[in-house]
Every structure is written in C-alpha cells, then in structure tokens.
Amino acid sequence: MKSKVIVDPSFRRMQEIFSAADQARLRDLVDVVWGKDEAMPLDDFLRALPEAEAVVCSDWRYGAVLDQAPKLKAIMSVSGGFPLKLDYEACHQRHIRVLSAAPGFARQVAEFSLGLALASAREIAYHDRLMRRGDELYLWAGNTNTFMLYDQPVGIIGYGSIGRELHRLLGPFGVSVSVYDPWLGDGYLRRQGVKPLPLAELLSESRFIFVLAVPSSENRAMITRDLLERVQENAVFVLASRAHVVDFEALTELVLAGRFKLATDVFPQEPLPPDHPIRSAEGAILSAHRAGSVAQGLVELGEMVVDDLEAVIQGLPPRRLQMAEPELSRRYASNRAKAPE
C-alpha cells in the first residue's frame, strides 16, 4: 500500500512547481491527498492527517495538531522559508523532519543578484531611461560614474545556498570575497575560499555588497543607519533576501542623497506604496520581488520534493531540501514583507 501524503502547496500552484514528469512521479510514488491549487479546507486536512506520512505545504496554517499525526515523518515547505506557526520542539522530539525548498531558489536568486549588480555598476537602467527621452550620453561621457565588477572587493551578507551559488558565479570575475554570517564558523567560511569579516568591516571594505541573509528573530534591521553610512561612496548595494534585515528608511535616504547605488528586489511592504520615496531615486534599480519566480527554476522545487519524499518513505535521510536544525529553528522569522495597510 502506498504512503499517504498531503499535498497542499497553496499559495503556489501544482503546475507551477511540479513538472508533468514530476507530478507523474509523485502519484506513482505516494497516495496524494488533495493535490490542488486551492488551499485545503482544515476539516479535510484534519481527516487526512492521522494517516499522512508527509505534508507538503507553503506554510503551517493548521494549528497545534501534531498529536493527531502519529505516522508523520516530514513537513515540506515550498514557500522558500520554514513554516512559522509550527511547534519545532515537538517535531524534533518526534523525529519529524521539517524541510524547506529554499535551496531550489539559489540559482534563480544568485543569477538575478549578479544581474542587478552588473546593471547597477554600469548604470544600464539609468542610461536606458536617458536614451528613451533623448538625453543619452555617448562613450566616455556616459561612463563617468560607472565601473566594472572585475577584481573588486565583494561582500556577501548571509552565506546560505544563495550566497554559495553567487560565490560560484563570481569566480570568473577575479573578485575577493568577504562574508558575514553569524550562523557559520570562521573555519568553515575560510575553507569555502572566503574571508570572514565583522559586518561593519565588510560594509566599509566592499565595493559590491550582496545582502542575502535569511530573516531571523535577531537580525531585524541589523544593517542600521550607522552601518549603512560606512558603505563606500558609489558602491553597489544589492538587497535580494528580505528588507527585514535593513533599516530601509535610512537606506532610502542615503540612496536619494547619492551616497551609493542600490539594486533591490524586496521592500518592507509589498506591493510597494506608490508614493514611497525610493521610487524617485535615480541611483536605484527597483524590481518587484521577481528574483525567485522563474518558471524554469520553480519546477526544481517539485523535483526536490519528490526526490526527498522517495527517501523519507523508505526510511532514508532527505538530501535535497534544507532541514530545520534544532539549534536554529527558534530563530527563524517571517520571510514575507507585510502588505500596505
């Protein structure tokens, strides 16, 4: 008899994350309960939970019901972060693996972050705007404030799956890479070929700064106004994880003042209010949270889920999704921006 698995990915859609081949693999592998785009009704979920060996969801919106799940082996989130309203202590005690598809976003977000950095340093979007209105500047005149990525000092804040993938992409540019990540030891970082630095030093020494830190209970607005004022004149500041980690008001003021360049894919409120002053910053490239929503990349989430489901139901450890570690699970924080009121 097949293992029963609740598949309730809403807000994501089934076809968005599972290719036709992976949907077929999924249904051949397990007895799929629900498996629809719409959110599963709580009553239906609770009826299915006692027999479920795994739950695939975007977040844990079912309440304190783990005592009703005697067969549960894994909770798999396809949102890009770990479920927030989940009793991690109970999961760890009962050996229920809590897994996130966050590594499936690494290539998408790393590639986009690199693109933002290049576009910012070479002022591609700004000069596109000039040319469209007939004010273009040719040759040298159009490059008075631009510079290349090659051979520059680069700082990465947060060396998780995205940071590691970005590091790989930066290889051909001959950059020196420094990293700030309090969740990783200095010895480990050095063995990855990067230089561990305190946050203040990284911000002051890097020409390119990539903010890729996972939001946590302890890093809200950790990049304060004082720290932002350490950033070099005309440096490139790429914000691609969450606005949670930055004093965004101070960031906006400094970019409007022309202190350094900004390229950001995330904002404190999404959708961004129409009157937010960052919209008028000529030194900023703004993107509407698009770095990790490429169809080609999203189907990797489903592939990873099916691969690890295959392992879990056979009593083997999952290898592709990211596991919630007991030492860190209490420190996770919201990974979504709040909507405007």
Image: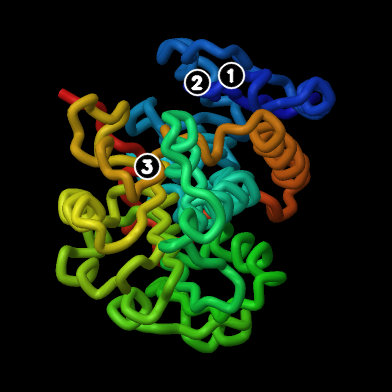
- Alpha-carbon neighbours of circle 2 within 10 Å: few (<14), some, or many (≥20)? some
Q: Which residue is mark 1?
A: 13
Labels 3 and 1: the sequence-earlier one = 1
Please report contact status of discs 3 and 1: CB closer than 8 Å, yes or no: no
Mark 3: few/some/many CA within 10 Å (<14, 14-19, 20+): many
Of residue 309 and residue 101, the one placed in the foreground of this image is 101
Who's the residue at 28% across and 78% down the image? 200
- Whether residue 237 is visible here, answered yes or no, is yes
Q: CA distance from mark 2 to mark 3?
A: 21 Å
Callout 2–callout 3 Cβ contact below 8 Å? no
Observer-nearest residue: 160 or 236? 236
Q: Earlier in the sequence, mark 2 or mark 3?
A: 2
Q: Are discs 1 and 2 less than 8 Å apart at CB?
A: yes
268 is higher (above) or lower (below) than 26: below
Where residue 96 appears, x then y in whole percent? 53, 47
Question: For the residue labelled by badge 1, is the local secondary structure a helix, a strand or a loop?
Answer: loop
Q: Nearer the viewer, residue 341 or 235?
A: 235
